Image (cartoon, grey):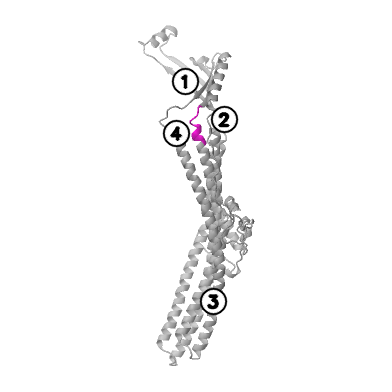
Amino acid sequence: MKRVKNIIIAFGIAIGSVSCVPKLALSEPEVDLPETFKYTATADTASVANLEWKQFFSDPMLQTLIEKGIKNNYDLQIALKQVASSQEKLKQAKYLQYPDVGFGVTAQISKPSKNSMNGQSLNLFLGKSYVEDYNAAFNLSWEADIWGKIKNQQEVSKMQYLQTYEATKAIQTQVVAAIAQGYYNLLMLDKQLQIANSNLELSTNTLSLTEKLWKSGDTTSLGVQQATAQKQSTELLITQLEQNIAIQENALSILIGENPGKISRTIEMSETSLPQDISAGLPAAMVSRRPDVRQQELVLLESNSVVGIAQANMYPSLKITANGGVNSFKIDNWFQIPASLFGSVLGGLTQPIFQKRQLKTDLNVAKIQREKNVLAFRQSVLNAVGEVSDALVSNESLKVQEQKATEQVATLKNGIKSAEMLYKGGMANYLEVITAQGNSLQAELNLASVKRQRLSSIVDLYRALGGGWK
């Protein structure tokens, strides 16, 4: 008992002598955030990103596509598998504080040289030229978590698991936004195809009228050629739009995890509805909501724990090992209890002294990596604020552009009517009619494009604010 007491006192003195070593102070990095987003009039605490995607996107067809994407998209499925893998590692990390226990059975026969001391001793005492050894024992090894190394290792596993979870949410926001963007692009192409078909009818009527005038001698063959070229140009545009529609349908099919094929849609672009009075909320709330920023913050927290592990490796480690079981030099009495029982316990305190500077290098590298992660976190916050600001300014600008484009279309459509009336009355030539039709076609196509860009800017803002993963 006295010896055991002395060992305990020795361990206590050794641990106490190093317990005064100061631990590394780790503070949360400061982030320079604006009080409000640029291009917002008021600092409203509410944010459109708090809406679930089913509330944000009210179109039933689009909701169906998004549901399929969340369920079947392969990028999302891969991310979910990564979450499951990290979850298993997290479960395993919870057992790091427990001792390692193993069981082994060994049987050994050795025959020394007859001319050796062991060989002659065997013959003398055992009356045989070989020796047997049979052993069955439990082995235990445990390290005391004096400096929090094991706790930090558990924290690393936890942060890595949470990173995969946030990464999955980030991928979902991207998938939801991509499906919505593709769907609205498809509606734009449908609208442009409808416009082109209407313009083809106008071009056909103009060509028919020009041919009649040419036959009556009221115009030249050049007029017929120009009208024909205008009609052919519209036919070419229709073919290109049909190609783009098929490609966009294929892209959407792949996003939702299906083979390329037709995408059903029951509404036109003019019937789409998204929240118009959009509140961006506060930048600080956006930072806590965006999965990619949260993921980078978790990387930083992980690096804090890695620094703690590297520092703990420089301090003494207390390890206790024990084994016990049955041992015999004859198989006949191997399991005779208690004669064959044996056991031993060993406690050791190890202080690294010279490791070729490896431990100090590991600590310095961990600190540098943490500094890099601080910068990466700040950069992710800055990028997020920039994306929201870009989406806000785009949305405001596209409101004005849509209004101007609508007015331009109305003006040019009236111009077509005027040009046709003047052409029939001989007061305008074929070039003025063709020019009016071409300008009107381009203006209508541009209006459809601006409307699609406006919808896209709203979707971009929703994603940039951290919406889409709920």
**Residue type marked 2:** Tyr
Q: Quadrant of residue 355?
A: top left
**Residue type marked 3:** Val
To which residue does mark 4 refer?
A: 360
Residue sticking out furthest to the left: 115
Q: Residues within 10 Å of mark 4 (few under 14, many from 20)?
A: some
To which residue does mark 3 refer?
A: 409
**In front: label 1 or label 4:** 4
To which residue does mark 2 refer?
A: 98
Label 1, label 4: how many angstroms apart (C-alpha)?
44 Å
Q: What element carries label 2?
A: loop
**In front: label 1 or label 3:** 3
All told, the count of numbered labels is: 4
Q: Which of marks 1 and 3 is nearer the N terminus?
A: 1
To which residue does mark 1 refer?
A: 107
Q: Which of marks 4 and 2 is nearer the N terminus?
A: 2
Screen quadrant of the N terminus: top right
**Residue type marked 4:** Lys
Residues in magenta, as a range: 308-316
Label 1, label 3: how many angstroms apart (C-alpha)?
95 Å
Do the CB atoms of the residues marked 1 and 4 lie less than 8 Å apart? Answer: no
